[in-house]
Image (cartoon, rainbow, N blue to C red):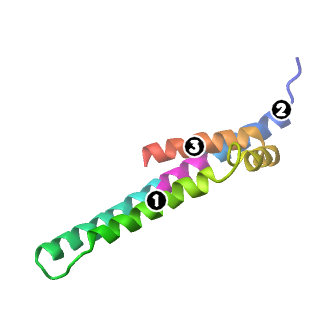
Amino acid sequence: MVVDIGSLASTATSVGFGGITGFLIGYAIKKVVKVILVIVGLVFVAFVFLEYQKLITVNWNKIQTSTIAAFGNATSDQLLARSGIPGTDHIASSMSSFGIPLTGSLTAGLILGFIRG
């Protein structure tokens, strides 16, 4: 059995590059999400405190309705509006143009980076 060193090195390079890039992207995404959630939480606490001090009046029913409408649109309208399995054509084309080793290692690195972040 003859192993082509050139193709093996090319595959190893794409796996290594994809894994490192995916890890960095996942790590950065988790950090950004944490910062956004802290800011949203602080704004919510500020509204509750200011309402408790009777400095402002917050219409919680309107906030609840707006939030439900926003999350409802993001989940049901965008994800379920497509027929069949969403995004399969895009995934197949990206895997064929980038290669399975690169996309697989990128995905694994993204998950590990998100977990570690």
* Viewer-nearest of discs 1 and 3: 1
Mark 1 and mark 2 lie on one chain; the one further toward the N terminus is 2
Q: Amino acid at mark 1?
A: Phe
Mark 2 and mark 3 lie on one chain; the one further toward the N terminus is 2
Query: Which residue is painted at 52% across and 51% down in the image?
Result: 26
Q: Position of residue 88 (x, y in %)?
A: 73, 45
Q: Amino acid at mark 2?
A: Ile
Q: Nearer the viewer, residue 23 or 3?
A: 23
Q: Nearer the viewer, residue 89 or 17?
A: 89
Neighbours of disc 3 within 10 Å: few (<14), some (14-19), many (20+): many
Task: Give the extent of the magenta segment.
Answer: 20-29
Mark 1 and mark 3 lie on one chain; the one further toward the N terminus is 1
Residue occupying the far right of the picture = 2
Q: Quadrant of the N terminus?
A: top right
Q: Identify the disc placed on residue 5.
A: 2
| Vertical side of 45 occupied by 101: above or below | above
Query: Mark 2 and mark 3: span between their CA atoms?
Result: 25 Å
Q: Which residue is mark 1?
A: 71
Residue 84 covered by magenta stretch:
no
Q: Position of residue 37 (x, y in %)?
A: 36, 61
Residue occupying the far left of the picture = 53
Q: Which residue is mark 3?
A: 109
Left/right placement of residue 73 relative to residue 14 reads left
Query: Which residue is painted at 45% across and 54% down in the image?
Result: 30
Q: Position of residue 85 (x, y in %)?
A: 68, 43
| Vertical side of 7 occupied by 55: above or below | below
Query: Which residue is painted at 76% across and 38% down in the image?
Result: 11
Location of residue 115 (image quadrant): top left
Query: Which residue is painted at 64% across and 45% down in the image?
Result: 106
Q: Secondary structure at mark 2?
A: helix
Residue 23 covered by magenta stretch:
yes
